[in-house]
Amino acid sequence: MALAHRVALLRRHGCVVRVLAGVGFGRRVTHVLRTAGVAYRDTTRAGPATHQKLMVLSGILGRDRSASYVWTGSHNWSNQSLRNDEVVLRVAGPRTVAAYERNVGRIWRLTGRKPG
């Protein structure tokens, strides 16, 4: 929930935020994100399922006005996962981030289609 509230706050402060949710996103997290106006797609309900956990940041991070990072790994965005042995990797650089953004965009487009 803490992460959902932080993402919601970033959106309210003007950040462009998109969330591709899969397994592990509960109703409370979804409610917080949608209430804040976060663009949201649930990959478990329509389109191809994904098990990715990642966050892409392009823009401002602290004093860095041209930040370009991706955080990815096995860690579910849930309170339960705080007790697990998980791994999170941060990768940096505009070219690498652009590759992740293309992949997220592809999945975003596919999850917007009606299954059939």
Image (tube, rainbow, N blue to C red):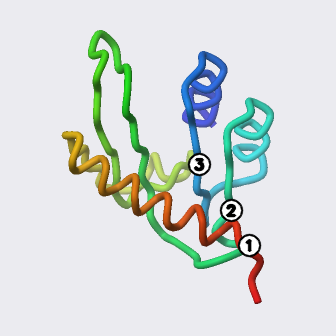
Dot 3 alpha-carbon crowd within 10 angstroms: few under 14, some 14 to 19, many 20 or more: some
Dot 1 alpha-carbon crowd within 10 angstroms: few under 14, some 14 to 19, many 20 or more: few
Mark 3 and mark 1 lie on one chain; the one further toward the N terminus is 3
User: Under tag 3, what secondary structure?
Assistant: strand
Depth check: 114 or 24 in front? 114
Horizontal placement of 74 versus 87: left or right? right
**Quarter of image, res 24:** bottom right
Mark 3 and mark 2 lie on one chain; the one further toward the N terminus is 3
Q: Vertically, is 31 above or below 105?
A: above
Q: What residue type is labelled 3?
A: Val
User: Under tag 2, what secondary structure?
Assistant: strand
CB under 8 Å between discs 3 and 1: no
- How far apart are the alpha carbons under marks 2 and 1? 6 Å
Give the residue at mark 2. Answer: 42
Q: Vertically, is 72 above or below 60?
A: below
Q: What residue type is labelled 2?
A: Asp
**Quarter of image, res 18:** top right
Image position, residue 30 (x, y; %): 73, 47
Q: Residue 19 carries which label?
A: 3
Horizontal placement of 40 versus 96: left or right? right
Image position, residue 90 (x, y; %): 25, 44
Give the residue at mark 1. Answer: 45
Q: Which amino acid does label 1 sit on?
A: Arg
At 67% from the left edge and 57% from the top edge, which residue is drawn? Answer: 41
